[in-house]
Amino acid sequence: MMPAGYASSLEHLADELARAEQLVRAQTQRWRESIASTKPDDKWGMAYVDQAEVDRYLAAPFRLTGLSSEHGAGTESAADTLAAGHRRAAADRASEIAARVQVTAPDVPLRLHLLVRRFGLDSTECDLLLLCLLPELDSRFRRLYGYLHDDVD
């Protein structure tokens, strides 16, 4: 079945933000499994790193998130495996969005696409823009980002 095009720029932006939310969910899952599960409640938001946390950091090889092992990234951690579903959901959403953009009427200006083209943003830069916009539009993300930064205050 052919997808319907976007009726408005706001509808397109909402879909892109929902896709970006999946990226936040993936990172939250990674954080929960890798660091947050061992951090004592009384140490949140403080400049405190215990020896066990330091040992985990030093034992882990350097890798860039999202690269497969054939690119030298090493094996996927348990936290990455748990987060993979959210990354797949984001990729699936990106495919759906691209299909809808293709069939959107030419008289419907998609402002996010115009912004991306005007400033020559690549997909990562566009994602960063969306991730910065999320807490401005939905206050849940302010607290969630604080959690991810280990600064919940």
Image: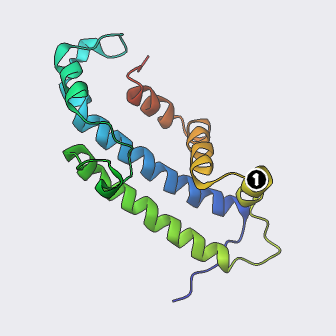
Which amino acid, by three-letter code, is at mark 1? Leu
Q: What's the colour scheme?
A: rainbow
Q: In the image shown, does 65 or 142 lie closer to the viewer?
A: 65
Q: Which of 97 and 34 is in front in this view?
A: 34
Query: What residue is drawn where x is 38% and y is 52%?
Result: 67
Q: Position of residue 18 (x, y in %)?
A: 51, 55
Residue 1 visible in image: yes
Residue beneath the point at 61% across and 75% down: 100
Q: Which residue bears the numbered disc 1?
A: 115
Residue neighbourhood size for the residue with mark 1, other residues' Cα within 10 Å, grouped as few (<14), some (14–19), many (≥20):
few
52 relative to 25 in the view: left or right: left
Q: In the picture, which quadrant includes the C terminus?
A: top left
Relative to 152, is 58 on the left or the right? Answer: left
Q: Where is residue 136 in the image (x, y as percent from the top left)?
A: 62, 36
Asked if residue 39 can be seen in this view, the reply is no
Kindly identify the residue that appears in the image at 31 percent across and 57 percent down: 70
Q: Position of residue 15 (x, y in %)?
A: 57, 60
Q: What element carries label 1?
A: helix
> Residue at point 25% right, 29% down?
35
Most distant residue in the bottom direction: 1
Quadrant of the image occupied by residue 147: top left
